[in-house]
Amino acid sequence: QVQLVESGGGVVQPGRSLRLSCAASGFTFSSYAMHWVRQAPGKGLEWVALISYDGSDKYYADSVKGRFTISRDDSKNTLYLQMNSLRPEDTAVYYCARTGDDAGGYYFDYWGQGTLVAVSS
Amino acid sequence: DIQMTQSPSPLSASVGDRVTITCRASQSIGSYLNWYQQKPGKAPKLLIYAASNLQSGVPSRFSGSGAGTDFTLTVTSLQPEDFATYYCQQSYGTPLTFGGGTKVEIK
């Protein structure tokens, strides 16, 4: 069965960096575009970043562009999110998600359980 | 960016009710509209993709319709496990965007 397990969250001071990981299993990781989606406490969902199945294309929300970098290591079946220059408004639960199989654009058919990032001094 | 607006929020309903949630896009998105259910402390779960396609394993009391800018999620005969927050999401283009959510509460 498809499993996505995030790790790397924690408490970090403003301006510092953090790297999130998402370990994938149960499917051919290298065949799927992958995403990061976040949810601030008590708020709605916000898409953060997308990487194509082969890593050649990457897209970001304006709120993180230039600060966050999405990447993947298909040999390890792992998705990453490098977060630099963190701000208090980046505080959220970060989910990794897989792009759905069928035609319909970029939707999310499987999600991890999430990892909490708290940016605070 | 494409803005997604959901209504109503919140929505108060009883077990057995037929419930309809509306999602409106700020521009035409064809059928590139998806619906998710989220329960407190849990990850979202895909219910409907491409406006009207039921995700595998999702009960048939859930259905989606619409195209262009106006979409609906309908739950026929609301069950106790359906009290949750529902989000729409457009997959027409990046940045991918979500509606603000509709919390379905017990009346």
Image (cartoon, coloured by chain):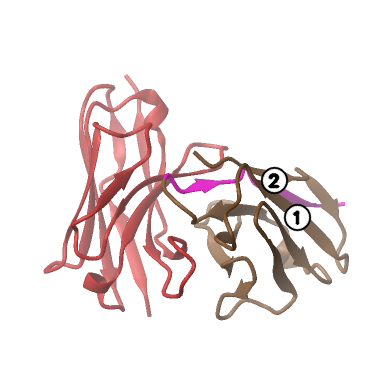
Q: Is residue B69 left or right of residue A89?
A: right
Tell me which residue sits at (59%, 63%) in the image. B31
**Sequence order check: which comes first, mark 2 or mark 1?**
2
Q: Which chain is red?
A: A
The residue labelled by disc 2 is B6
Query: Chain for mark 2?
Result: B
Quadrant holding the N terminus of chain A: bottom left
Q: Horizontal and vertical percent for residue A13?
A: 27, 24
Q: Secondary structure at mark 2?
A: strand
**Amino acid on which the number 1 mark rests in the picture:** Ile
Q: Is residue B10 left or right of residue B43?
A: right
**Label 2 Cα crowd, 10 Å radius (few <14 / some 14-19 / many 20+):** many
Q: Nearer the viewer, residue A78 or A102?
A: A102
> Is the same chain shared between marks 2 and 1?
yes
**Amino acid on which the number 2 mark rests in the picture:** Gln
Name which quarter of the figure residue A57 lies in.
bottom left
Picture colour for chain B: brown
**Label 1 Cα crowd, 10 Å radius (few <14 / some 14-19 / many 20+):** many
Which mark, residue B77?
none
> Does A41 sit above or below residue B104?
above
Query: Chain for mark 1?
Result: B
Name which quarter of the figure residue B72 lies in.
bottom right
The residue labelled by disc 1 is B21
Q: In the image, which residues are magenta? A: B95-107
Tell me which residue sits at (30%, 69%) in the image. A32
Residues under numbered marks 2 and 1 in contact, where contact means CB atoms less than 8 Å apart:
yes
Q: Horizontal and vertical percent for residue B78?
A: 80, 67
Q: Nearer the viewer, residue A99 or B9?
A: A99
